[in-house]
Amino acid sequence: MKNKTVIYAIIDWGLGHVTRSTPIIRRLINDGNRVILVSHGKALSMLKEEFSECVTRDVKDIQIAYPKFGWMFVFKIVSQIPKMLLGWRHERRQVKALVKEFNPDLIMTEMRLGFWNKKVPSVLITHQLRFHLPPGLKWAGIFGEWFNRIVFKKFNYVFVPDAEGTPNLSGDLSHNSRISRHPKVKHIGCLSSIVPDADPPEKDIDLLISISGPEPQRTQFEEKILGQLDSISGTGVITLGTPAIEKNIVKKTDNVTIYSHLNRKEMNIMMQRAKYIICRSGYSTVMELLALKKTALFVPTPGQTEQEYLAKYYEKEGLFSHCTQDKFDLKDIHFNSDRRIAKEHIPINQLDLINELLESLCT
């Protein structure tokens, strides 16, 4: 697909949605397409940094508040339905304005469900075909699938960044259900903006801690980590995941360096240099670890049932370790260096396949 105009909208729910879209956006640009990037907040800041050559538009998305405890998930989400409906109505108005301004050939959206247009081919990117619910609320899962089926009617394709069969990385979130066989669903393999260098750097960082995710849990995790700096032995690096702040070294001790944010190139190098990694169990992070063949300790965002499910799923599969945020204590952390990514043959960055699918929509 070449010489097309693409509106690419990304939700501002953690930076992972930006990082996993980076390979697709870069391929679109390199193929001579004009890409208009739409996002908000930290996600938009990161997009501007990574793709300074692109036109950007600031369109606020729906900021969903997550519960502190998983069992409150359904009730918390249901209570915010009116806000969601108003948010999607706002997005629909913005899409009409953007279509009028740019006359796009294609719309792609990373979890912004209001970004579609009847006159323009539209693609949704998500790995959550099903919502993982805590025990006792499994019965409500059917309503989540029903909701997704309604959403899918608005899009030509639904791209799932995972392998189609087994092994896979998303487990029950996008497999083993009727909706995973929906005719619009296309499994496109994993996406990672971080790839190993042909000549990898020396592993001279003992511990890399990546702090990320939606507020207020991102800040709470940051405060917990910064309060335990004395427990870091050896060389440590901490990234705060705050790209809206001017990028610099926030703090430096004898053995720990703290950055407000690292761009993709810098983070790529840092992850390769690290012997051990502590991070959220966000799906985009998992795909990056897969690409680098790294192991890690996951600390899922409290109340995000998807991350909590994935952390437990990977530990059961023998791939990663995990710890809850409330019990997290650096002095008690013991890394299991025997855990390794065993699913190395899961395809990563199948950009030719993605290009073929997109081209079929624009011809």
Image: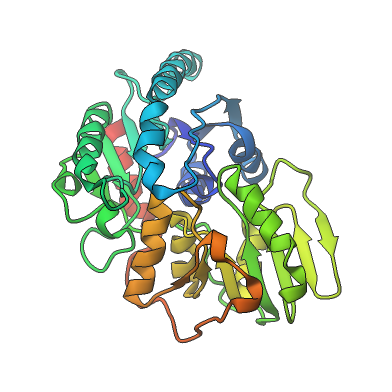
Q: Which residue is drawn at 52% across and 47% down?
A: 26
Q: Which residue is drawn at 37% across and 69% down?
A: 314
Left or right of residue 49: residue 162: left
User: Is residue 79 visible in the rendered structure shown here?
Assistant: yes
User: Which part of the image, by quadrant, shows the N terminus?
Assistant: top left
Q: In which quarter of the image is residue 170?
A: bottom left
Q: Residue at x 81, y 75 (%)?
A: 255
Q: Which residue is drawn at 67% across and 59% down?
A: 224
* Image coords of residue 18 (percent x, y): 52, 45
Left or right of residue 231: residue 284: left
Front-most of residues 45 and 233: 233
The relative height of residue 155 versus residue 334 in the rendered view (above or below) is above
* Image coords of residue 146 (percent x, y): 20, 34
The relative height of residue 26 versus residue 345 in the rendered view (above or below) is above
The relative height of residue 35 versus residue 168 in the rendered view (above or below) is above
Q: In which quarter of the image is residue 81?
A: top left
* Image coords of residue 347 (percent x, y): 34, 64
* Image coords of residue 208 (percent x, y): 65, 70
User: Is residue 275 visible in the rendered structure shown here?
Assistant: no
Front-most of residues 343 and 61: 61
Outermost residue toward the bottom in this view: 338
Left or right of residue 32: residue 249: right
